[in-house]
Amino acid sequence: MIRALHRWPGLVALALLTVLALSGAALSVFPVAERLSAPATDPGLSVATLAERISVQFPGVEQIRRAPSGKITAYWFDLGTPGSAIVDPDTGKAVADADPNPAVRWLTNLHRSLFLGDAGRIVTALGAAAMLLLSASGAALVARRAGGWHRWFSRTQGPAAGRWHTMLARVAVPALVLTSVTALWMTASTFGLLPEAGPLPIPETVSGQTGAAFHDMEALTDLPVSALRELTFPYPGDSSDVFTLKTDRGTGYVDQGTGSLLAWTPLSLTERVSELVFTLHTGQGAAVLGLLLGLMALGVPAMGMTGVLIWRAGARGRPRIAANATAAEADTILLVASEGGTTWGFAATLHAALTDAGQRVHAAPLSSLAPHRYTSARSIVIMAATYGNGDAPATAKGALDRLAAQTADIPMAVLGFGDSGFPEFCGFARTLADTAEKAGWPLLLPFDTVDRQSPQDFERWGHALGDAIGRDLTLNHQPVRPATETLRLVSRRDYGAEVQAPTSILRFALPPASLWQRLTGKGLAGFRAGDLIGILPDGSEMPRFYSLASGARDGFVEIVVRRHPGGLCSGMLTALTPGETVNAFLRRNPAFHPGRGRKPLLLIGAGTGVAPLAGFLRANVKRRPMHLYFGLRDPKSDLLYGAELSDWAWERRLTRLVTATSRGGHPRHVQDALRDDAAEVARLIQSGAKVMVCGGRQMAEGVRATLTDILAPTGLSPATLKAQGRYAEDIY
C-alpha cells in the first residue's frame, strides 16, 4: 500500500514537480543576491528619521516599504506621475530602480501558477500535496528498507538507481516536507481559506491638523527600521487622512497633526504563522535557509529520474501473475513481448493452466531472457505481439540480439499474436522464431499464431503444447474487455455512394476529461491525429481500430469509415445518426506522428487513409511544408475533406495537393502521381523530408516500390528512410 502511494503520485506528478523544484531552486538564489546588494541600515535608525530623509528627497512620497532582506523602497507621485526607487536609508537618496528583475518575475509566475492564474495555483498546490505524500511515503519506505527509523543513515545495497534514490531521499525529505507544507499554507492563504484577522478599527477622532514633525511622532521615533513593514502617508491636503503603519507586531493609524497613535491591531496568530511560513518558503529574510532549501529541491528531478528507472525495472521484471515461480525452480519459462498489454492476458491464462496441470511456471518479459538462470526448465514458451510494421514492442527492444547470443539445450516454442489484416502479421514473432532456429535452440513446437486475439486459435495451440509437454492442457481464455468511454455522434458527412464505396466522416463530441485523466493520459485525454480509436461493435469483444483525423486540441473526435459488405463495425458506424453513441477507447500510435521540426512532410494516402493526414494538416498552425498525394476514385463523389483542403491551402497549412483519380478516362493511382513528380519527390526527400503513408496494403506496397525506383539514383530507399525515422506507415 505504501509503495503504491509512493509510486503513482510520483510518476503522475513528475513533470510538474520537476518544474516547481527547478524554478524554486533558481528563485532561492535571488534573496541572497538581494540581501548582499541592499544598502546597509544603521541598527539604531528610527522610522521617523528614515521618513524625514526620504521626504526631503521625494516631497511627494506616498509609501515606504521595507523588504525582509532589508531593502527599502520609496513610492511617490511627481506632478501626477508615479515613481519608485530603492533608497539608501542613510541619505534617503535613490540608489537603484525599484522595478523587479524580469527573470525573478518570470520565475515567480512560473513557480506560483505556471502562468495560468488561479487555475495554475491550484495545480501547483496539488503538486505540493503530491510532494508531501511522496516525502511521507518515501520516508516510511526508507525506514522499512533500513530496518527502522534508528537506522535511517545505514548503508544501502542493491542496484545503483535504488541506492541513489534512497540516499537522496535521506537528505532531501526533511526540506521537501517543510517546502510542501509551507506551499500549501500559502495557497490556502491566497484563496482565503485561513482564519482572517478582524478589520483595523477606524479611528473615532482625528485632530484635523497637519504638519507634525516626524520626530514628534512617538510611534515612529520609538520604532526601529528593522521592525518596519510599510508606512503609508496621508493624502496631501486631506486633514482627515492619517498615516498607516505596518510593523512586525501589528498595524495602526498615526495622526498626521499630533503624531499620536489613534488605533492599533496586533498580528493574529494566523498572520504570525503566515509571516514565518513566507520566510521559510521563500528565503526572504532568511537567505541562507532559502538557499539550502533550494539546493535540496534539486534532489526532486534526480529522485524522479531514479524513481522512474526503479519503476521500469519493476514493471519489466515482476509481471502481476499469481503463483509465479522463480526462474531457477520453474519447469516452464514463459517470456512475453507485449505492446498494449493484451498478450499478458493470454500469458496469465497459460500460466494458470500450466500451474493447474502441475507445472511450475516463471513468467517474465522477453527482455529478461537469461538461460543460465533456467536451471530446472524443461521448456521455454515465447508469446510475442508485433508492433507497427513488423517491429518489436517497446518492452522487447534488443530481444533478437539476446536470443541469438544466448542459447541453451531447452526446447522452445514461439507463439505470435497479431491481426492478419495487416501486411506484417506476427512479423516480429516470426522473426523471433527464425532467429531462435538459426541460433540452435531446440524446437518444442512449430511457430504458430493467434489471429485477432482469437480464443479458438489459442485453445487449439494449447492442445498442441499439452501434447508436446505430456500434459492435458485446455486454454479457456476470456478476453478482457478494455475500459471504454461513450462517444456521441454530433455530425456526419457522406461520400462515395456514386462509386460504390460509401464512406463517412464521423465527428463525435469529445468527452470531458478529468484532472486525473489529464495527468495520467487515461481515457481520451491528450490524443493526437494519427493515434487510433478502438470501437467495440455491439455484441462483440473484439475492437476495430480507426486512425484519428483530429487531436484533443480540436475539441472533437473524428474518424473516416468506409462501409464494407458484411462489416460488423463499419456497418454499425455508418448507420449512426447524430445523437447516437458508441463505446470507444484510445490506443496511442507514436510511430505515426509527424514529430517536431520544420523539415517537409510528404503525406501519401488513398481513400480513408487520408484521415490522419488531414489531422496533421489541421494541426499545422506553424505552416510546416506539407505535400499531400491523395488517391481517390472520383473527385465529384469521394474527395474527402475537399473544402477543408482548399482552406488549408489558402492558410498555407497545405503546401501542395496532388490528387490521383482511379476512375474516368485517364485512371491513375498515387504511385503514378509520385512517378510523375519523381524529380520533386526525390528533391524533397534529399532535403530531409519525412514520408508518411496511410491506406490499404496494396497501395502501400505500390508506394514503397515506386519510391524505391525514384530514390535509387540518390542511394536512398524506403528501408533506409525507415531506419532513419523518416518513413512511417499506417496500413490496414
Image (tube, rainbow, N blue to C red):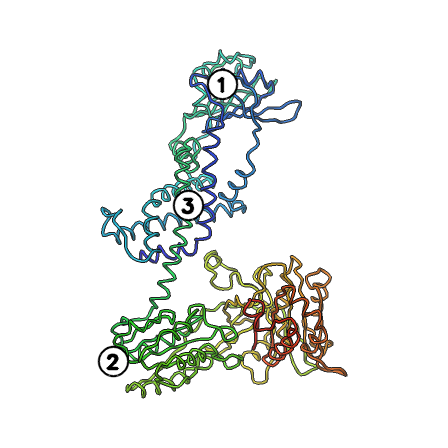
Q: Position of residue 249 (x, y in %)?
A: 41, 25
**Image quarter of residue 84:** top right
Residue 339 visible here:
yes
Q: Position of residue 553 (x, y in %)?
A: 58, 59
Q: CA distance from mark 3 to mark 1?
A: 47 Å
Q: Which residue is mark 3?
A: 298
Q: Measured along the vertical axis of the image, is residue 470 above or below residue 250?
A: below
Q: Earlier in the sequence, mark 3 or mark 1?
A: 1
Q: Which residue is mark 2?
A: 358
Q: Which residue is mark 1?
A: 254
Asked whether, in this view, residue 51 is left or right of residue 475, the answer is: right
Residue 525 bears which disc, if any?
Answer: none
The local crowd at label 3, few if under 14, some if 14 to 19, many if 20 or more residues have their Cα within 10 Å, is: some
Q: Earlier in the sequence, mark 2 or mark 1?
A: 1
**Image quarter of residue 341:** bottom left
The local crowd at label 1, few if under 14, some if 14 to 19, many if 20 or more residues have their Cα within 10 Å, is: many
Q: Position of residue 515 (x, y in %)?
A: 47, 56
Asked whether, in this view, residue 502 is left or right of residue 460, the answer is: right
Residue flagged by tag 2: what amino acid is it? Gly
Front-most of residues 366 and 527 = 366
* Secondary element type, mark 1: strand
Residue flagged by tag 3: what amino acid is it? Leu
Which residue occupies 70% across, 78% down?
Answer: 672
